[in-house]
Image (tube, rainbow, N blue to C red):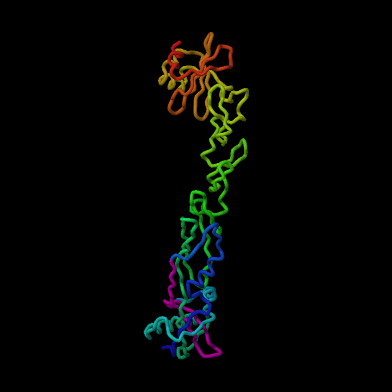
Amino acid sequence: MTDQLAYAVPDDQPDSVHRLARRLFPAYSVENGGLHLAGCSFEDRLFWLAEVGSPPETVKVYLDGDGKQVDEKLVEQLGMLHLSELEKPLELIQPDRMAPIELAARLACAEAGSEPAPSLPVVLTALWCKFVEGKIRFEIGENTVDLSFSDWAATLEPPPFVCPYTGEETFKLAATDDGRIVAAEKIETCQETGARVLADDLETCTISGRRAVKELVEACPVSGESVLTSNLVACDSCGEEVSPSYLQRGQCSACRKLAAMGKDDPRMVRILHEHPLLDRWNRWRVSETAAVYVLVASGWFRQLLAVIDKDSLELKRVATANRLSTTWNVVEPSQREHVLRQ
C-alpha cells in the first residue's frame, strides 16, 4: 500500500464565477447591449499524482480517476505541475481506492522503462481539477441569445458566437432592426429604407448598383436581372415592367423578337382551349418572358395583341392597332370579348 496520501489542487485554475467572467467577457463586443453569465457550474474531477521511489530517483506519474495515465500536455494545461496542498480534502479517499492507483502507477513506470521495485515507496496525491459548464447570455434591447461553453476551467477560452442565421463565427454581436442578434460583420444598411438587416436579406440592383431589401427588388421578366421596383419601366406593348436596359423605343426585347407560331403549337393549344375567342384570329407570332406569353395576330386591317400569364393562362392585356402601326390601344377588360369577336 502507499505510504501516505496528500490532497491538492492546481495553483492557478479559475475557481469562481467572477474569475471565469474576467477571462471570457473581454473577448466580446455587443453593440448597444451587454452580456452576463446565465448559469455556470463547476465540477471537481479527481486525478492522481503518484511519486514512486525516493529522491532523487523519484518517478512522477499522473493518472485520471480511473487509473489511466494522463497525457503530458494535459498535465501541463491543467496546471498539475504546480499544486497547492489542501488542509481539508474535497472528498475523503478511502484506502481501498488507493491500491489500484498504486498498481497503475507502477505499471506506468514499467512501460516507461523504469521498473521500481515493489518495495519502493509510493506517495499518492489526490488532486482535483475543475471542469466548468455554463452559458453566456447576450442582451440587446429586449432580445437575448445564449452561447454555451464547457471545458476545463484552466483551459477554457472564449468560444466564438455562431450566428444562427448566417453560420458566421464572431466575437462581435449586433442586432438587426427586426431584433435578431447576429454577427455584426454581416449587418448592412438598406440603401433605400435605411433599415439595418443581414447582408443576405439584400439584393443589388443591376441598374443603380444600390443594395436594397428583397421586397423592393424584382427580377426583370425579360433578363432575369435584379432591379429595384422603382427602376422598372412598363413596356408600351405588353405592359410588363422590365429593366430599362432592355427597352428600345418603348418596347421590351420580348416584344421586338416575335416569332411565327402555328395553332398546333402546344403553347397555342393550351391558350386557345382557355380562350377560344382567340381562335378567330390568325397569323400568330409569339414571344415569352419569364412570366407571360406575348402574342400578336395580324389581319388585313388590324393587329391584336394578347398578353397571357404563363402559369394561370389569365388574359392580362388586350390591345389593338392598325395593320402598319406600332402604337397599341389597350382594350378595357369589359370590352375584350367584343373586340375578340370582331
For the N terminus, give its image quadrant.
Answer: bottom left
- 261 to 158, vertically: above or below: above
Residue 77 vs 194, above or below: the answer is below
Q: Position of residue 93 (x, y in %)?
A: 39, 83
**Near-viewer residue (329 or 248):** 329
Is residue 103 within the magenta segment? no
Q: Main secondary structure of the magenta part?
A: strand
Q: Is residue 284 visible?
A: no
Query: With 251 as the anchor, is 273 left or right in this view?
Result: left
Q: How many marks?
A: 0
Image location (x, y in percent) of residue 55: 54, 90
Spot occupied by residue 70 in the image (x, y as percentages of width and height): 49, 75
**Location of residue 206 by image quarter:** top right
Residue at image coords 58%, 14%: 325
In the orientation shown, which residue stands out farthest toward the top? 300
Q: Is residue 175 above or below residue 84?
A: above
Tell me if residue 51 is in the magenta stretch: yes
Q: Where residue 144 sits in the image (x, y, percent)?
A: 46, 57
Q: Is residue 234 left or right of residue 315?
A: right
Write down the region rendered in magenta: 39-67
